[in-house]
Image (tube, rainbow, N blue to C red):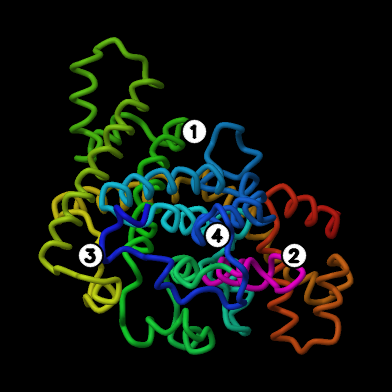
Amino acid sequence: MDAVLASYAADERQSRGRRHVEPSSIYRGEYQRDRDRIIHSTAFRRLIYKTQVFVNHEGDLYRTRLTHSLEVSQIGRTVAVALHLNEPLTEAICLAHDLGHTPFGHAGQDTLNVCMSEFGGFEHNLQSLRVVDELEAKYADFAGLNLMFETREGILKHCSAKNARELGDVGERFLTRKQPGLEAQISNIADAIAYNNHDVDDGFRAGLLSLEQLREQPLFATRFDIVRDLYPDLEDRRLIYEIIRRMIGAVVNDLIEETRRRIDAANPKTIDDVREAGKPLVSMSDAMYEQHLSLKKFLNKHLYRHEKKLAMTRKVQKVVRELFSAYMEDVACMPDEFAKAAQSADRPVRARVVADYIAGMTDRYAISAHEALTG
């Protein structure tokens, strides 16, 4: 694969490596090993029972954090291969980007952040890095998964200056205003493409979005007209799928072409040139981004803030708040490994242990734990 990589792609031979030195694998590259470690992690398996938009028990066919992560990976790999970038690294970052997400999606994250407001807050990107650096317990020689620097860098999409200073090398770019490698940039935008388009599918399936509403969005309307002309008698279920796959195709093609244009203009020779570029080189065109952003705003108004969705949001916020309060009051309510870590700790450390425990829960486990505590 190295022979076809662009000179500015991430190359494991020039990587900053792992925090703990390990012998190389005979048959796998280092980023392939990272991908495999992520897939075999406990946190990755739990994603199948964590909310994307709809709480897990609301329906079997809605997307979960796991299926979302796989869809992000598919988009990211397509873009990486087209641009001669490092596909295994891109895949690893895409698969790991939501490992730190709480149960109940953004409602769970926002509520846990409020609960943690006195103790440094909670942010799922930072928690994803914490999972792979510290919380996964797999190996005899070290905590976490001991991933390569570039994988860890890509997982950490956002970071405050305060947290960046505490994270050492992986937080440095947030202080020096540098960019991550192109593989990390791809993963970031592939995430946005995946949820923007696939949430249309889940919203329509749930009956919260109508064709009439969706046709007000240019990205949807253009593909609707094409598909309806080609297949005038197609039922709604297949109609929606045909439209969405064409929407994704259009956005991804635009992303590849615009990114090529920006790379050609910047003319980077190495990954260090990418880091010094001043702004991301992976981007949609202005026209496509405007349509993408319009759809995102539409979903925020008509799906994420739909009354039926908000009713469930209020219920799960109550679950997270009451779990946090109960565990802070009595750490013995948690499993032994968490209880022992929190038992003699000061309140900030205790709160972080409680947040780690709650963030690792699946939707159904959180509901069950809440019922056990509250009756």
Circle 1 packing at 10 Å, graded few (<14), some (14-19), many (20+), is some
**Which residue in the structure is indicated by mark 1?**
206
**Which residue in the structure is indicated by mark 3?**
281
Q: Are marks 4 and 2 in contact (CB under 8 Å)?
A: no
Q: Nearer the viewer, residue 142 or 65?
A: 142
Where residue 59 appears, x then y in whole percent? 60, 34
Circle nearer the N terminus (3, 4): 4
Q: The disc labelled 4 sits on which kind of residue?
A: Asp
Q: The disc labelled 2 sits on which kind of residue?
A: Leu
Circle nearer the N terminus (4, 1): 4
Q: The disc labelled 1 sits on which kind of residue?
A: Ala
Q: Nearer the viewer, mark 4 or mark 2?
A: 4
**Which residue in the structure is indicated by mark 2?**
323
Count of numbered circles in the view? 4
Residue found at the far left of this picture: 265
Based on the picture, tell me whether residue 264 belongs to the magenta stretch.
no
Q: Answer with left or right where residue 361 lies relative to residue 44.
A: right
Distance, label 1 to label 2, CA atoms, is 29 Å
**Residue 115, above or below 206:** below
**Which residue in the structure is indicated by mark 4?**
34
The C terminus sits in image quarter: bottom right
**Residue 263, above or below 371:** below
Q: Nearer the viewer, residue 82 or 253?
A: 82
Find the magenta span and give its range. 126-146
Q: Nearer the viewer, mark 3 or mark 4?
A: 4
Q: Answer with left or right where residue 332 lies relative to residue 138.
A: right
**Residue 268, above or below 234:** below
